[in-house]
Image (tube, rainbow, N blue to C red):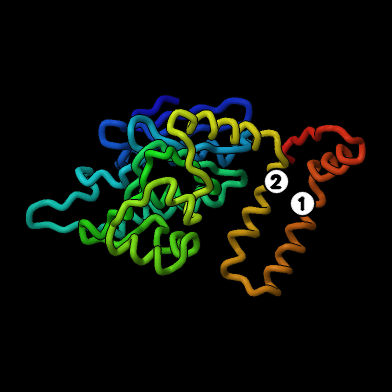
């Protein structure tokens, strides 16, 4: 398939989704949402996909919503229902990304602002170029952080820092974001894409189903009691124990060889 606002490639189990509106810092339009939905349809149904990398072209990762998009731009004498855009586009996007049964890596190649920042932070592992920065830009135009920003930020960096970033819109550089635990790692700009792809290729050879179950356990832990989490771990471990990858992992360990996981 051909796309106008994104690029998509799939090779040897590694899917790479690249936002491709560099002249507007890869800001979101209705068309971009539609094209990303079609790509996620492929990723969710193709059992060969074992890792997804999300990144951007040009000097920015994503500046959030394109405010000139007619779907959200206010016109003289009229007002827009921005909740409709959240309900139709951003909310489902976050839910689908977080539910993918595989590791999702975000390679933040430049500024990540507004929804762009929060979409990045919703991914499992976030790598960022050292020149990249994260901005909760919503307060600058009288809006509320969306795309799960008010959910993700407090869990990553605590309520005090989350509140200050959301209320001031102060940018946070990648190395500071790493120091705060907002992201996994800040890397040299010229090493970002190689680092992300090396990590992605690593995951294509790992026990994908076990990693997916691990994601599920970690995501549930914030809302479960200790007893509930222990029960969930039991249930997920039972499921993992029936996988072919578990059998292969134990066999390889006993035979002192490198395992050959199939993701099943």
Say whether residue 202 is left or right of residue 93.
Answer: right
The N terminus, quarter of image: top left
Residue 188 against residue 242 in the figure, above or below:
above
Identify the residue at the far right of this view. Answer: 255
Q: Nearer the viewer, residue 41 or 113?
A: 113
Which percent across, then down, holds residue 193? 49, 30
The residue located at (34%, 64%) in the rendering is 164
The residue located at (40%, 34%) in the rendering is 56
Residue 10 visible from this viewpoint:
yes
Q: Secondary structure at mark 1?
A: helix
Whether tag 2 and tag 1 are in contact, CB under 8 A, the answer is yes
Q: Which mark, residue 209?
A: 2
Q: Residues within 10 Å of mark 2 (few under 14, many from 20)?
A: many
Which percent across, then down, holds residue 159? 43, 68
**Residue behind mark 1:** 240
Which percent across, then down, holds residue 86? 35, 56
Which percent across, then down, holds residue 30? 31, 42
For marks 2 and 1 on the same chain, the one whose residue lies earlier in the sequence? 2
Q: Residues within 10 Å of mark 1 (few under 14, many from 20)?
A: many
Residue 89 visible from this viewpoint:
no
Q: Nearer the viewer, residue 115 or 97?
A: 115
The residue located at (76%, 36%) in the rendering is 261
The residue located at (57%, 70%) in the rendering is 223
Say whether residue 229 is left or right of residue 182.
Answer: right
Q: Which mark, residue 78?
A: none
Q: Nearer the viewer, residue 201 or 130?
A: 130
The C terminus, quarter of image: top right
Residue 162 against residue 36 in the figure, above or below:
below
Q: Secondary structure at mark 2?
A: helix
Where residue 48 sits, quadrant-wise, is top right
Say whether residue 38 is left or right of residue 79.
Answer: right
Where residue 6 sits, quadrant-wise, is top left
């Amino acid at each position: 398939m051909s796309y106008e606002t994104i690029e998509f490639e799939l090779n040897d189990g590694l899917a790479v989704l690249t936002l491709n509106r560099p002249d507007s810092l890869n800001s979101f339009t209705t068309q971009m949402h539609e094209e990303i939905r079609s790509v996620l349809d492929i990723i969710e149904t193709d059992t060969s996909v074992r890792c997804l990398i999300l990144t951007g072209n040009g000097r920015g990762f994503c500046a959030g919503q394109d405010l000139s998009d007619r779907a959200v731009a206010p016109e003289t004498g009229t007002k827009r229902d921005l909740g409709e855009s959240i309900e139709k586009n951003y909310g489902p996007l976050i839910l689908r990304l977080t539910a993918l049964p595989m590791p999702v890596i975000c390679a933040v190649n430049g500024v990540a602002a507004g929804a762009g920042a929060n979409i990045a932070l919703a991914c499992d592992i976030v790598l960022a170029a050292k020149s990249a920065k994260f901005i909760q830009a919503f307060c600058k135009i009288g809006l509320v952080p969306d795309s799960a920003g008010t959910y993700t930020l407090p869990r990553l960096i605590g309520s005090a820092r989350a509140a200050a970033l959301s209320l001031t819109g102060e940018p946070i550089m990648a190395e500071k974001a790493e120091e705060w635990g907002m992201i996994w790692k800040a890397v040299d700009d010229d090493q970002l894409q190689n680092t992300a792809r090396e990590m992605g290729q690593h995951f294509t050879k790992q026990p994908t189903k076990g990693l997916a179950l691990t994601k599920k356990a970690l995501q549930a832990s914030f809302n479960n009691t200790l007893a509930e989490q222990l029960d969930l771990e039991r249930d997920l471990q039972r499921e993992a124990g029936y996988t072919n990858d578990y059998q292969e992992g134990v066999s390889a360990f006993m035979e002192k060889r490198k395992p050959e996981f199939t993701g099943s």
